[in-house]
Image (spheres, rainbow, N blue to C red):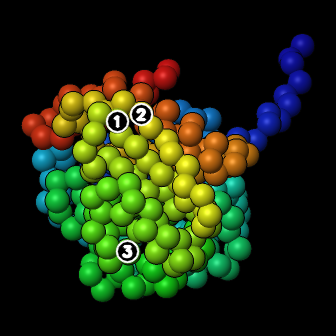
Amino acid sequence: MTAAVTESQPLPRVMTIAGSDSGGGAGIEADLKTFTVLGCYGMAAVTAVTSQNTQGVFGIHEVPPEEVGRQIRVVLEDIGADAVKTGMLASAPIIEAVAAELRRFDTKNVVVDPVMVAKSGDALLHETARDALVRRLLPLAIVVTPNVPEAEALSGLRIASEAELRRAAERVHALGPRYVLMKGGHLEGPEAVDYLYDGRTLERFAAPRFDTPHTHGTGCTYASAIAAWLARGESVPEAVRRAKDYVTGAIRHHIPIGRGRGPLNHLWRR
């Protein structure tokens, strides 16, 4: 006699809309690893194919905007998503296509990682695309996750202290997202301190700072972990807290491969 087959409880569904990383440490590859480890079913819409490794980005081939939109549309109308994370979007037409589909499906729990520059210093967002990012995408975000250089670009302010970081957070929040997570990894100090701003209060999240160059994919992983925890039903502050713990462990247990900035260890908890 065979055992009866029963349907298991569906996994939380999370979609990433981002560029690929042929080295595997960042982009869609990092996002999908993160979703899987945190107990979610991951899906992806590819915005650009990049040729990169631990030393830099050597080529970018953008996917036509209409195809980016189609990837999102066919997934959301069939499978749906409990959260969506955006990463490298490359150009204004791609941003327009992404925002149009997210609005079409009234997508909730949108986490925007405003990817502008790779760890290697290579530009990943055209200058002309920043306006589209601000006008079309940020108002759809439950949380946007800029690092210091990205926050400076979005706010127009120089950031070198906690007070300046708060002023920048206020400016970015005024652009439309419900929460702004200001990542402080670029600031000096024994701890890596991030600040979550909701328009009224600034909540502090601190973790040890590790003396290692192997941090490739930190921003992608952090934003993806936040999206995963939101898909699992956590509030934004709790999703940030849990994501911070996960990415800190992934940095602590980094993988020293390649000749440049090695990747995080997404599997450190397994």
Viewer-proximal residue among 155 and 135: 155
C-alpha span from label 1 to label 2: 6 Å
Which three-letter amino acid code belongs to the residue tagged 1?
Glu
Horizontally, residue 148 falls left or right of residue 119, namely: right
- CB atoms at circles 1 and 3 under 8 Å apart? no
Horizontally, residue 130 falls left or right of residue 204, namely: left
What is the total number of numbered labels drawn onto the structure image? 3
Residue 207, numbered label: 2
- CB atoms at circles 2 and 3 under 8 Å apart? no
C-alpha span from label 2 to label 3: 25 Å
Q: Residue at x 22, y 52 (%)?
A: 119
Q: Residues within 10 Å of mark 2 (few under 14, many from 20)?
A: some
Which three-letter amino acid code belongs to the residue tagged 3?
Leu
Q: Residues within 10 Å of mark 1 (few under 14, many from 20)?
A: some
- Indicate whether 162 appears above or below 133: above
Residue 191, numbered label: 1
Helix, strand or loop for disc 3: helix
Q: Residue at x 28, y 39 (%)?
A: 189
User: Looking at the picture, how far across and down is residue 97, in whole percent?
Assistant: 50, 81
Point out the tag, 1 or 3, that comes first from the N-terminus. Answer: 3
Residue identifier under label 3: 154
- CB atoms at circles 1 and 2 under 8 Å apart? yes
